[in-house]
Each structure stands twice: as structure tokens, then as C-alpha cells.
Image (cartoon, rainbow, N blue to C red):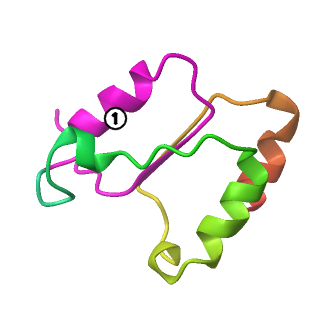
Amino acid sequence: MRLKLKKTIEIGVFTGYSLFLTALTIPEDGQARVDHKINFIESEALSVLDQLLKDSENEVNFDYAFMDADKDNYCNYMRG
């Protein structure tokens, strides 16, 4: 079964393996190659989420979200 994900977000990363696997599932019409599918941002998740949601390109929902960050803020990430 192949998922038809075009827009995904991962909050929290350790080695990046789940991010890499997610990028492999995004079809070529989502974006070009795997290395061009990833916009890696290293920062505090809540402040970055606020900035991402202010961007008009992110007004639509994400097809897939993977959270593996600090568990205490999960509810805050979902409210974003």
C-alpha cells in the first residue's frame, strides 16, 4: 500500500530516520528528489510552528504529522 502524502510535518527528530522514510513516500509531483523534499529546521518547535502557520502556503492541513518531541507539549503542538 502506497500512501499519497504530499505535505507532511515531523516535530522532533533524533537520527532523522523517520523523516527520511517519510520523504521517500512523498511522490515526485509533491517535490523533486528526496533531498529537496526536506526543509529541516532546528529550533524550538512551538515558535517554528507559529511561524509556519503564519505562512500562507501552510493554510491547508498536513497530510501526515509525526510527533516525537517533548511529550509535555503534545497538546500545544496540536493546537497550533
Front-most of residues 17 and 64:
17
The crowd level at tag 1 (other Cα within 10 Å; few <14, some 14-19, many 20+) is many
Say which amino acid is labelled 1.
Thr
Q: Residue at x 49, y 67 (%)?
A: 61
From the viewer's perspective, is 50 left or right of 42? right
Residue 26 image offset from top left, x and y in percent: 23, 46
Work out whether residue 3 can be spotted: no
Magenta-highlighted residues: 1-27
Work out whether residue 75 can be spotted: yes
Q: How many marks overall?
A: 1
From the viewer's perspective, is 44 left or right of 55? right
Residue 28 vs 60, above or below: the answer is above
**Judging from the image, what secondary structure is the residue with disc 1 in?**
helix
Residue 55 vs 43, above or below: the answer is below
Residue 11 image offset from top left, x and y in percent: 61, 40
Residue 76 image offset from top left, x and y in percent: 82, 51
From the viewer's perspective, is 29 left or right of 6? left
Q: Which residue is mark 1?
A: 22
**Residue projecting furthest to the front:** 42
Q: Residue at x 82, y 47 (%)?
A: 75
Q: Is residue 37 magenta?
A: no
Q: Residue 17's quadrant in the figure? A: top left
Q: Residue 1's quadrant in the figure? A: top left
Front-most of residues 32 and 11:
32
Front-most of residues 39 and 17:
39
Q: Residue at x 77, y 57 (%)?
A: 47
Q: Residue at x 68, y 56 (%)?
A: 48
Residue 45 vs 21, above or below: the answer is below
Residue 8 image offset from top left, x and y in percent: 42, 50
From the viewer's perspective, is 65 left or right of 28? right
Q: Is residue 9 magenta?
A: yes
Q: Residue 52's quadrant in the figure? A: bottom right
